[in-house]
Image: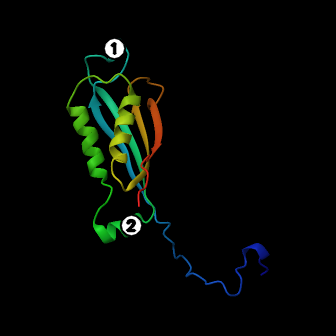
Amino acid sequence: MPTHPDTTPPSDAPLREPGASVEDGRDTIVIEGLAVPAEIGVLDSEKGRRQAVRFDVEIRTVPDYRRIVRETGRYVSYADTVTFICDKAAAGGHVELVEDWAEAVADFVLSNPLAESVTVKVTKPEIFAEADGVGIRISRRCGRIATS
């Protein structure tokens, strides 16, 4: 069976085992569909009452994350992020914009030096019967400057 010349490795190239994967040194930690009751919204009908708010969070780790975890025991905790969101909701107080919630979660996540970037989606599922949810998705990356 002929092979395409661009896909044939050079004869001196090391071959990998079929099915063997290579770690790229980064992982994505995922929180999906975390639902909490919160006072949120700019509409008069949203003030003074709690409504469901759903969070999806993807945290991209720094290069060599798994090695760092193995060697130091430090890690990015999805449990800490869930607790942050739940505690913020439980503390009460009205939040006007889903954007403010998303920014607060992103800031919290990026305070961990092992988190390189984060995407936070905050939706309100009860606003329109025709939609599963309305809200915002933001992506932020770490603004830390490495020092030697």
Find numbered disc 1 in the image and state the secondary structure of the residue it sits on: helix
- Answer with mark 1 or mark 2, whichever residue precedes in sequence: 1
Amino acid under disc 2: Arg
Count neighbours of disc 1 (C-alpha within 10 A) and say few if under 14, some if 14 to 19, many if 20 or more. Answer: few
Q: What residue is disc 1 on?
A: 45
- Percent across and percent down for residue 73 are 27, 66
Q: Count all numbered tags in the image, as a single digit.
A: 2
Is the N terminus in the top left, top right, bottom left or bottom right quadrant? bottom right
Find numbered disc 2 in the image and state the secondary structure of the residue it sits on: helix
Question: What residue sits 40% from the left and 45% below the top?
Answer: 57
Distance from disc 1 to disc 2, alpha carbons, whole Å, reads 47 Å
Amino acid under disc 1: Ser
Q: What residue is disc 2 on?
A: 66
- Percent across and percent down for residue 90 are 21, 33
**Residue that sits furthest to the top in the current view:** 44
Residue 93: image tag: none
Q: Is residue 80 above or below residue 134?
A: below
Q: How is the image coloured?
A: rainbow
**Residue that sits furthest to the bottom in the current view:** 12
Question: What residue sits 31% from the left and 37% below the top?
Answer: 35
- Percent across and percent down for residue 56 are 40, 42
Q: Is residue 24 above or below residue 118?
A: below
Q: Is residue 66 above or below residue 59?
A: below
Question: What residue sits 25% from the left and 39% below the top?
Answer: 86
**Residue that sits furthest to the left in the current view:** 91
Q: In this rendering, does residue 125 appear at all? A: no
Is the C terminus in the top left, top right, bottom left or bottom right quadrant? bottom left
